[in-house]
Amino acid sequence: MNLSIHFIKSMSKELGKAAISWTGGKDSSLALYEAKLLGYEIVSLATFAPSKPEFLAHPIGFMKYQAEALSLPHHVLETDEPFKESYEKAIQFLRKEHEITTLITGDIAEVDCQTNWIRECSKYSGVEVLTPLWGFNRQELINKLLSYKFKVIFSCVKKPWFTDDWLGIELNRNSLEKLRMLNTETGLDICGEQGEYHTLVLDGPPFKKSIHVGAYSKHVNASLMYINIQQVALKEKS
């Protein structure tokens, strides 16, 4: 056996099984891949959601296509009030039912000076939390995403930073340059950490199949503009 392959397999066994807190966007996808490169064995996608979720930017139905494309099970874990207890029980479920020892998130930094919510809720079950993107420069993260050749589209954008022309376009070098300009002009977070925009991932290194979006419509809900995907297909990768 190739020595490097043997090392990675040994490392994976030592690190144990992991689940990833899954949103379907660029950050959780990049975190998943970075964790795999570190040697973690990813066994599940886990989405924490209320009992009747209405995710405009990251539809649960689309995540099911992503799970199939990644060849991973997807668990939607119900989280309602009291929220901390609800999250604690959901993470405990992942530990007991799927034998995970680590929960991975795509968190980049603190939001509004709040402590990391998943880390706090994981203490109850003793599950470790890995945040492989934490503290990185925003543009460096986008550059890394693009260098790995992830295919990402804008699924939801917010006024006043964006117009609906951004909906459905790919996050690439050209759109990154426009984000940089918006950052200079308006203070927009390049990674959208303040909710300025959201994304969906269609392909990338960990994907066994690619996702093709055939048709979508554009909608407006107050300051939010988002796409409603009507046609989706999985395609074999060449």
Image: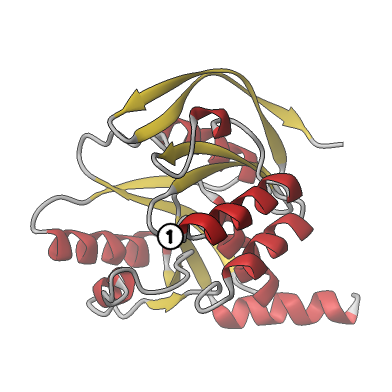
Image quadrant holding the N terminus, namely bottom right
Q: Position of residue 17 (x, y in %)?
A: 52, 69
> In the figure, is residue 165 to the left or right of 177?
left
Q: Residues within 10 Å of mark 1 (few under 14, many from 20)?
A: some
**Residue 66 position by quadrant:** top right
**Residue 202 position by quadrant:** top right
**Measured along the vertical axis of the image, is residue 18 above or below residue 115?**
above
- Residue placed at 32% from the left, 69% from the top? 118
- Residue placed at 25% from the left, 72% from the top? 121
Report which residue position mark 1 lands on: 193
> In the figure, is residue 184 to the left or right of 102?
right
- Residue placed at 71% from the left, 62% from the top? 143
The amino acid sitting under disc 1 is Glu
Q: Position of residue 208 (x, y in %)?
A: 71, 43
Image quadrant holding the C terminus, namely top right
Considering depth in this image, is 168 or 214 the residue closer to the camera? 168
**Measured along the vertical axis of the image, is residue 74 above or below residue 218?**
below
Considering depth in this image, is 156 or 215 the residue closer to the camera? 156
Which residue is farthest left? Answer: 82
> In the figure, is residue 189 to the left or right of 206?
left
- Residue placed at 82% from the left, 74% from the top? 5
Q: Is residue 203 visible?
A: yes
Q: How is the image coloured?
A: secondary structure
Which residue is farthest front? Answer: 185
Considering depth in this image, is 202 or 44 the residue closer to the camera? 202
Q: Position of residue 125 (x, y in %)?
A: 27, 75
